[in-house]
Image (cartoon, helix red, strand yellow):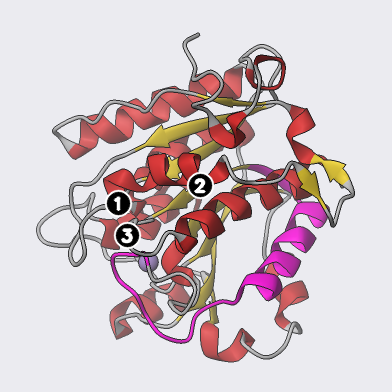
Amino acid sequence: MEYKRYPNNFLELNDSLSGYKESKVVIIPVPYEKTTTFVRGTKKGPQAMIEASMAIQFYDEELQKDACNVGICTLYSLKAKEKPQLMIDSIYKEVKSRVEDNKFPIILGGEHSITQGCVKAFAEKYGNITVLQLDAHTDLAEEWNGSRFNHACAAKRCFDITKRIVQVGVRSAPIEEVEFAKKNGIGIFWAKDIAENEKWHDKAISRLSQNVYITIDLDGFDPSFMPSVGNPEPGGLQYYPTLRFLKKVCRQRKVVGFDVVELCPNKNNISPDFTAAKLIYKMIGYIFFK
Ligand SMILES: [Mn+2]
């Protein structure tokens, strides 16, 4: 198994903490960008997150431990395929192999359409899973710009597989998708309703099956601190409140894997790259140190 070694891997880990055999976590960079509609550049997202991660302190002040001790192996980027269907298949196969090796995959995007390949692999392994989606958008279009693989269809493709999705932080959706969600039991937790309280946490978690896959579209966060996304929307999720929610999810359910997508790095403001990298590290802590 080929993987990135010190000093080029996630967190700049030495060999004993980043070998494939020893690591519980495997980072899979998928620098795929095909259907971006507004700002381009998300194919540079995975590398920007890996580079930003090199500045992270291993000590997690919440856990009072070095979360990296679980072992985090960083794979080389998955090669882009011209046809979207081939790309999705290749993601599916890659994630499935990691799951079969009993690894915990973290997939770095790249555009949101990559999620369906991941979800297919996890659904086959675990049967019943819920997709928990942090996103400004519903992404429930059947087709967009003539393609079923457009990022605007990302959640619909996941729904086709799992029939269970919970969406958090939504603030931009066409009426047809809101109606589709209502009809099909997709829980939408609108940004406006969850911004100033945590009453919704239990309600959202109660809708999750025991096994949960999390997809984090970074545009779910507020553009004030996460402007490096293709489709920014005002009024998004805040950092600490979101961490508190994710921590509860990781405690109360079995999170089987997650992805972080749609980072569109901007050389003049690298702070969002660091936020994305830190979020990944916080999640690793929540999942492995309960
Ligand atoms: Mn989105």
Residue extending farthest to the left is 146
Residue 65 found in image quarter? top right
Q: Is residue 211 left or right of residue 63?
A: left
Image coordinates of residue 245 in percent, x first then y, are 72, 68
Q: Is residue 250 magenta?
A: yes
What is the CA distance from the residue labelled 1 to the residue labelled 3?
10 Å
Q: Nearer the viewer, mark 2 or mark 1?
A: 2
Q: Is residue 20 above or below residue 127?
A: above
Q: Is residue 110 visible?
A: yes
Q: Is residue 281 above or below residue 229?
A: above
Mark linked to residue 52: 2
Secondary structure, mark 2, is helix
Q: Amino acid at mark 2?
A: Ala
Choose between 51 and 135: the one closer to the eye.
Answer: 51
The residue depicted at 55 percent of the width and 22 percent of the height is: 98
Identify the magenta region.
Answer: 228-256
